[in-house]
Amino acid sequence: MSEKIEKMIRSTRDLPSTHLLGTGTPMCAGCGGLEALNGIYDILGEKTVFVNAAGCMTLLSVYPFTPFRGSWLYTAMASAPAGAQGIRDALDILLEQKRITTDDDLEVVVLTGDGAAYGMGLSATSGAMERNLDFIYVCYDNEGYGNTGQQYSGATPHAAKTATSRGFAGFRGYKKDLFSIWAAHNPAYVATVIGAEPLDLAKKIEKLRGMKGPRMIIALSPCPTGWDFDPRETVHIGQLALKSGIWPLKEYIDGKVTHTKVPRKRVPVEDYLSLQGRFRHLFEPTRNEKLLDEIQARVDSYWEKIEQDEAEK
């Protein structure tokens, strides 16, 4: 996108009317990750190179076809940040030797699922941030290892059923707070986004383009296949994630966390949970009031703390 267009993104009417990413990919119908990637790629533009860790999105570029307008590199699940380091170093050497101009430079973008971001690749990502690597990291978070059958990951929410948490109570653990883990490294930028809120997403990608250093994005990605819902409900479920307060939209810059969209009147979390087959056991054959109350209480506690912090400012 041109500088002129970038500075015009102030309302949904200013968003691109067509997508850079090609159509007809092998991704599942209703993929929330693809929805977010479309919005991200539209703002980043064609001068990007994607470093794609093993996961759902590696299905995008199956030789000899690719939906990307530029370069794409496949890596093992844990090593995408290392691949990004090599590409960034090579580009910097070419720039220093004047073998390419700044107009030929590329934005290096890591693209991973939550399995890599929250688990297998976390140490490599930590190292990249410690080295202040100039790159963008995009995690499409579908809260499980979706490419291999939706086993639980470090992003799986409490009580969700997955291929490896099939008990009556679902997953007994809790979703890892990756936003805070990344922010603790003091990178240039960390933000949460979701494709169902395209203007917030576009503004954040526009903002990070003007920065240098590690810029980290977590995109909640409703997954019809892994979460067990009708693909037509992807946007609706994404909006309920926001309205219920389960997925806070926020950003970290210069040591400060700001919430970019605050649900003033939250809907009950069960409005969000009840549409997904992975939580069906909380409602059928009888309601599991204990688990439902616990999930609601954790969400309420989060927002009460945010409101308290705001009141003390």
Image (cartoon, grey):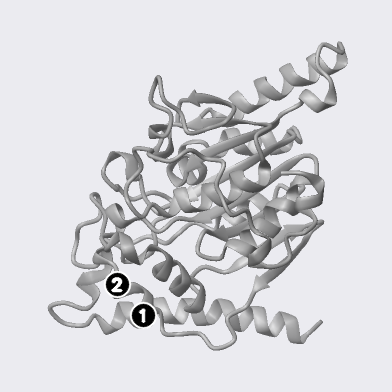
> Horizontal and vertical percent for residue 289?
28, 84
Contact? badges 1 and 2 (CB < 8 Å):
yes
What secondary structure is found at the residue carrying circle 1? Answer: helix
Q: Residue 136 lies in what quarter of the image? A: top right
The image quadrant of residue 249 is: bottom right
On the question of residue 171 being in view, the answer is no
Q: Residues within 10 Å of mark 2 (few under 14, many from 20)?
A: some
Q: Residues within 10 Å of mark 1 (few under 14, many from 20)?
A: some
Residue that badge 2 annotates: 275
Compared to residue 14, the image places residue 58 above or below, namely above
Left or right? Give the position of 139 relative to 5.
left
Q: Which mark is residue 271?
A: 1
In the image: residue 73, left or right of residue 13: left
Q: Amino acid at mark 1?
A: Asp
Residue 98 percent coordinates (x, y): 87, 13
Residue 232 relative to residue 10: left or right: left
Residue 303 is labelled as none
Q: Quadrant of residue 158?
A: bottom left
Q: What amino acid is found at the position of numbered circle 2 in the picture? A: Leu
Is 249 or 62 nearer to us in this picture?
A: 62
Q: Is residue 83 above or below residue 300?
A: above
Q: Pinpoint residue 265: horizontal percent, then vertical percent.
A: 54, 88
For the N terminus, which image quadrant? top right
Q: Position of residue 300 (x, y in %)?
A: 51, 82
Above or below: residue 200 compared with residue 244: above
Spatial CA distance of label 1 from label 2 is 7 Å
**173 sits left or right of 72 in the view:** left
Q: Secondary structure at mark 2?
A: loop
